[in-house]
Image (cartoon, rainbow, N blue to C red):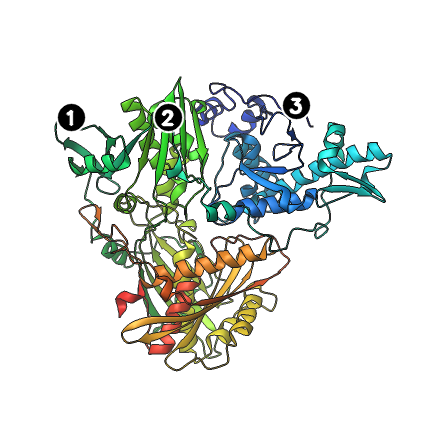
Amino acid sequence: MLQKAPDRPAAGRRLLPSRRTFLIGTGAALGLGVAFLVWPRRWPLPRLGADDDVMLNAWVRVAPSGEVTVALPQAEMGQGAWSGLAQILADEMGAAWERVAVEPSPFHPAYAAVGMVKGATAGLPPLVRDVAGFVGAEVVRRLNLEITGGSTSIRGYHDIVRDAGAVARALLAGSAARAWGVEAERIEAQEGELSFGAHRMTFAEALSGIDPEDARRARPRAEGRGALVGRPLPRLDLPPKVDGSARFGADVRVPGMVFAAVAHGPAGNGRLVEVRGPAGARFVKGENFVAAIGETSFEARRALAALEPRWTTDGPPAGDDMEPQLAAALDRDDPKPVHEEGDVAARLGPQPLVADYRLPFLAHACLEPMVATCRIADGRVELWGPTQSRTIAVGAVARALGVDPEAVVVHPTLVGGGFGRKAEADHFVEAALVARAIGRPVQLLYAREEDFQADRFRPAVAARLRGRVGADGRIAAFELRIAVPSVGRSFMQRNMPALAFGGDGPSAQAIEGAERLPYEVGAFRAVHLPVEVPVPLGYWRSVGHSFSAFLVESFMDELAAAAGADPLAFRLRHLGPTSRHAAVLKALGQEVSWGEAPPRGLARGLAVHESFGSVVAVAVEAGVEQGAIRVSRAWAAIDCGRAINPDAVRAQVEGAIVQGLSAALYERVSFAGGFVRERNFDAYRLLSLAEAPSVAVRVIEGGGTLGGVGEPGLPPVAPALANALARATGKRWRTLPLALAL
């Protein structure tokens, strides 16, 4: 119901009980049921905008000028989340796109990521799914869980913002209906205007006659009735990024602020022992960092260079032995498979095809290094900076300072590249510790070398695949043994320790994308071999799919070669006639003109993979020329269910292809004594603009459930490139980065 929005709650007011209180007070078995009785059902809605703006609900407000502003919790890091969600809401509301603006929402349970639960429970039986979905959504809301990741921004919030747009339209239409003496259901809302016959009224004019009771009649329009969804509308965040008015983390300035430059010790298990420096040096010591203070960022960096920190490690430091440990794990006795169908051992026979694959540790290498500004005053901790999760940031800072979470306020800025790295909160924690130690506001900025050293890495992987093609040309058996540390366990222990359940045993999630196949095979087995490493691991764009697609789709080409079959035809033979994978592969084949010969010296390879609810197929044309790998062209086809903004979908797939090629060709992190060797772009090579191929992307309107877009384009890239090189050179390319194999 629409009401005059109260003022923002005071910093010390408790909106939510702590998770610790919940667990202790309710017990494990009856926790959720009891919690529903004791947790508050409603929270005061923060006031947004100017005093004369009208808040139609938590998501949308209308100014007297008619401008519609949408409040959104998702981080904008170039993926177009702000524009896509605003497009959905404006389409349902009937707003004019040129009069729509966006702003970060308050940190409030009204904006919690309850939509993520829908995807997580989709595979459960109906009754169990509905109960689990309700319980899960309540937990997410009551824990105030906010996160941008897993390609969930659009699909996770689609229904929520669409309903918010429907409520806003119902309120405005009700106002016009009373003014004209007609039924509200007969009023149209389009381009920021309400109409019935010859009657016209702008949204701004309708504000004075709004009745909160009209919200009860809100109903979303039929799909396709709006004028905005499905159109390639201009992005809302691009003009300020082009003209320089956009504000990122390093642009923040607070009165009395100083600067801090930081150095980190050995990755993962490092510890600061002591720091020596010149007389009068200002620095702050942390558990595994030291920060030097200066009135300018240059002075802070110069002061840091004069310090001599000494480090140690708790246990062996990260080094060159980690990847051999992964390879050795492949020879361990089999744990219980995470998934198994049929008798693999019998169907493999005495001489199966065997292939070992290797992938390295990777860094995020975001254009924007980690940066945070902190001010502590009057019992309130304020922070500014890029983040993919205010929930994690608030919790981490509160734990580090020993304060109540309600005393911590995080103001999110635009994110200059996230890829999962900025779901972490180490930059906020370090800035808060420094600000408390020196008693002044501080901006802490990682130098590029420290951004690499203190990264949370995509894990290295070792895998052994075995398979056999039968006399009928079909796959008789397919087995994967994958040695890889658990990213999720590392992330949760570091960022949400109260929710870090489970041990270090085999996990289907750790090898996501390889735990099941889309292909119809005689027998299948997937084995996860967990391995502990001393470095911190984090979510990297597409997470486990970033390596599982390389394993599965590279081996599919090897099996196709063993069968003497065309790679595209071989895949289609193992897919059902109604398979989304088959439809996407066929579309890709048409786009590429697969049957035509490529230019001399080049060959084409392809791969298909499903992740985050979308299916993407990629083809790459490449070869080896003058001792270097040359990638000339790339194509992709994506079925993401429905494209809210087709241009944004293409842009995300294009970017994923470039990043995927960069990682496949060049990127690798190695360690010595706990320190990263590749600590800047002279050693951690990225794909250059001159090397980038032409890219064509075909968006398929599959009509199914909305899928993700930000991550699914990356996984098929590496195997498509490796398969192209195999056809061009006659040898298999099983180790990434591929340039090292030359």
> Which residue is the extreme one toward the right?
181
User: Taking the image as drawn, is residue 526 in sight?
Assistant: no
Viewed as shown, does residue 281 lie left or right of 296?
left
Instruction: Estimate the x, y position of residue 724 in percent, counting from the top left.
Output: 39, 73
N-terminal-most mark, 2 or 3:
3
N-terminal-most mark, 1 or 2:
2
> Which residue is the extreme one toward the front?
243
Residue labelled with disc 3: 4
Instruction: Estimate the x, y position of residue 683 in percent, counting from the top left.
Output: 24, 56
Q: Secondary structure at mark 3?
A: loop
Viewed as shown, does residue 367 lie left or right of 280?
right
* Distance of label 2 from label 3 (alpha carbons): 33 Å
Residue labelled with disc 2: 255
* Distance of label 1 from label 3 (alpha carbons): 55 Å
Amino acid type at mark 1: Gly
Q: Is residue 688 above or below residue 369?
A: below
Number of marks in the rendered image: 3
Amino acid type at mark 2: Pro
Instruction: Estimate the x, y position of residue 431 in percent, counting from the top left.
Output: 32, 31
Front-lying residue, 102 or 37: 102
Q: Nearer the viewer, mark 1 or mark 2?
A: 2
Residue at left offset 36%, top offset 65%: 690
**Residue 552, quarter of the rendered image:** bottom left
Q: Secondary structure at mark 2?
A: loop
Amino acid type at mark 3: Lys
Q: Secondary structure at mark 1?
A: loop
Q: Nearer the viewer, mark 1 or mark 3?
A: 1
Which label belongs to residue 280?
1
Q: Residues within 10 Å of mark 3 (few under 14, many from 20)?
A: few
The C terminus lies in quadrant: bottom left
Whether label 1 touches label 3, CB < 8 Å: no
